[in-house]
Image: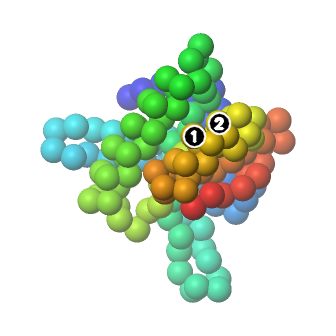
Amino acid sequence: MPAKDIYHQTVRNALEKDGWKITNDPLTIRIGKKDMYIDLGAEKLIAAEKGESKIAVEIKSFVSRSEMNDLENAIGQFIVYHDALAIREPERILFLAVTHKIYLDIFEEPLGKLLLKNQRVKLLVFEPKKEEVIKWIK
């Protein structure tokens, strides 16, 4: 099983503050002989819809020397997990969790805006010090 991201507990706390129940830590998905470990699985009762909303969250800290390398790896991993979830747990929506700073540095720039516009990734933006979800971008 892979090591947890430095913001793992922070995002978990932020989700719980936001009313989510953590159901999997990690969420294991198997395709053929390959196991994948998505950082968190969570669900929330949606009263207005009289049902549940289920998500999976992959957390990325972007701490290497190359922001572009981190972005390329994160997007690649997101695509693999997204496609695996579509087969194994299609009711779950996958989000990439990034700090507010990374959101501003990457996803408010032209390349990041392009990725969001083309729906390559869905984001959960969080504030690490407050352990709070700032925004969801679908």
Instruction: From the top left corner, tell me how far across and down residue 61 is, in percent.
Output: 61, 29
The amino acid pointed to by label 1 is Leu
Where on the picture, by quarter, is residue 91? bottom left
Which element is circle 2 on?
helix
Is residue 95 visible in this depiction of the protein? no
The mark lying in front, picked from 1 and 2, is 1
Give the quarter of the figure containing the C terminus: bottom right
Real-space Cα separation, disc 1 to disc 2, in angstroms: 7 Å
Determine which residue is flagged by label 2.
106
Q: Are marks 1 and 2 in contact (CB under 8 Å)?
A: yes
Residue 64 percent coordinates (x, y):
58, 17
Q: Residue furthest right?
A: 130
Mark 1 lies on a secondary structure that is helix
Left or right, 76 with reference to 30: right
Residue drawn at x 52%, y 47% is 115
Q: Which residue is mark 1?
A: 111
**Nearer to me, 44 or 92:** 92
Residue 51 picture location, percent across and down: 53, 81
Location of residue 105 with respect to 92 vertically, above or below: above
Front one among 43 and 77: 77
Q: Earlier in the sequence, mark 1 or mark 2?
A: 2
Residue 97 position (above or below residue 17): above
Mark 2 residue crowding within 10 angstroms, few (<14) / some (14–19) / many (20+):
some
In the picture, measured across the screen, residue 129 lies left or right of residue 38, that is right
Q: Please indicate, yes or no, whether residue 101 appears anywhere in the rendered image.
A: yes
Residue at x 33% of width, y 39% of height = 36
Name the residue nearer the viewer: 59 or 69.
69
Determine the residue positioned at 43% across, 43% down: 78
